[in-house]
Each structure stands twice: as structure tokens, then as C-alpha cells.
Amino acid sequence: MRASGSDKAPGVAVASPAHTAGLLLALLVLSVGGFRHPMSEWPQELSVPGARTLLYLQILALQWVWAGYVWLGVRRAQGGVRELIDASPWTARRWLRYAVVGVGGFIVWLVVAAGLGAILRPSVEQLRGLQSMLPHTPQERLLWIAFAVSAAICEEVVYRGYLFRQFRAATGSALAAVVLQAAAYGAAHLALPMEMVVSVGLLGILLGAIAVWQKSLVPAMILHAGTGLMALAASGP
């Protein structure tokens, strides 16, 4: 299946180096700040009524803050955020291809994630911490769906769109840019145990590779949304 579409000036930065440095620094500071709440404390902290709802709303707000920051940086670039997402004409045939690639990528990630789980073997404490984040009530499930879809849009724009383009302009290499944006994506999740950070980084590489292959963020958004929505199955009825 051949990718097509626009890839205008792939080696040209879409924002200033200072803008990119500001984003990376802010992501790292917030990620390291997560160490103040170790995973072992998550079940107790999130058992407080309304705690998960507040957490989901905070994450949703942050996602759009990052996306808004990117928009401010690229709004003067040719095409702006639209160029980052997909500069090609959007047709039914193209969207069908994106859906097939996105779903196929999701299936590939399920296999990879299962293998990583067997190799990295997260501890019982880590699994309990993750379980405590999952929604329990209908309202929480609706917010989780919004969170998963929002993450698929905003994080793909920030990492596979903006940071990929900035790293590619700086290094002159698409491969280096895919690796660097995945490293930034993993570093933004440093509050998680290192085994999970590795998994997040590898997911970032897969998402980046698909975005480069298809010259579009849409298939990666579909895959990304699938990983978030899949967690609903683990949250029970």
C-alpha cells in the first residue's frame, strides 16, 4: 500500500528552536513532578470520591494546553497545524486507507505489548497502581473516552507532528527524528515505572514510523485512540 500526499519541505522547521526547547522543558518538568506521587500511593489517592474525575479533567486540560502551545508556534508556518496532521486532500478512499492502516497498527501493537508484558513483567504494585487509574463509574467512563480521543489528537500533533518535524529539521534524518520524538514521548511519562516508560517509547516509535510511512497523523491517531479505549475493557462493567 503506497503512501501518497504532500510532504512539503520536510527538512524545514515549523517553529523556532526556543519554542521547541520551551515545550520540551515544560514536558520534562511536569513529568519529573509526577515522582512526588509514587505509583504505590495511587490506589489510596484515587480512592477519594471525585479524584479520578479531577485527574481526567486535568489531563484533558494539559493535552489541549500542549496542542495550543504548538499551534502558537506553527501558526505562521505554511499550512499550520493542518500541515502537521495531513496536508493531502481528504477523500473517502484516503480515509479508508488510514482506517485500515490504523487498525492494522493497533493489532500489531497488541502483539508487541503482549510480548513486552511477558518480558518486562510489571510488578503487582505497578499493576494495582494502573488499575486504580481506570474508570469505575459511567461518568468516569465517558471522561475516559474523551481523554483517550483527546490524547490521540493532541499527542500525535505534539510528538509525531510538531516534534518530529523539528527534530528532522535539526538532524536531517527522518529515522533520527522518529527516535528522538519517541524518546521525548517516553520521557514525558517518567512518573511511570521504567518498564512502562520503555513500552511507551516503543509505542512512540511505532506511531512515528506509521506517520512517516503514510505522511499523515490520522492512522497514528486511530491506533493511539485504540490503545486508550482498550483500557475500558480492563475497567470492568
Image: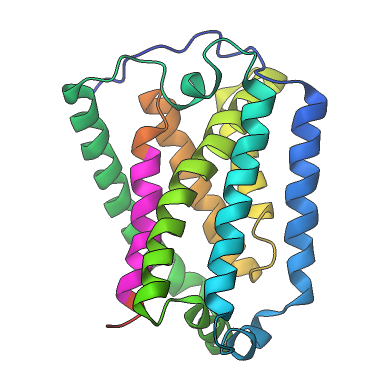
In this image, 86 relative to 60: left or right? left
Residue 191 drawn at (x, y percent)? 69, 67
109 part of magenta stretch: no
In this image, 192 relative to 200: left or right? right
Please tell me whether residue 51 is drawn above or below residue 158 in the rendered image: below
Q: Quadrant of the C terminus?
A: bottom left
Dominant secondary structure of the magenta stretch? helix
Q: Quadrant of the N terminus?
A: top left
Which quadrant holds residue 116? bottom left
Which quadrant holds residue 175? top right
Q: Is any atom of residue 179 visible in this view? A: no
Q: Is any atom of residue 198 visible in this view? A: yes
Q: In front here: 47 or 165?
A: 47
Q: Residue at x 40, y 82 (%)?
A: 136
Residue 107 drawn at (x, y percent)? 27, 53
Please tell me whether residue 46 is drawn above or below residue 178 in the rendered image: below
Residue 165 drawn at (x, y percent)? 60, 24
Q: Residue at x 69, y 53 (%)?
A: 187
Which quadrant holds residue 195? bottom right
232 part of magenta stretch: yes
Q: Residue at x 55, y 14 (%)?
A: 10
Q: In front here: 11 or 221?
A: 221
Residue 55 drawn at (x, y percent)? 59, 70
Where does the magenta region start and end? Answer: 220-233
- Colour scheme of the rendered structure: rainbow
In this image, 213 relative to 132: left or right? left
Tally of numbered discs: 0
In this image, 3 relative to 196: left or right? left
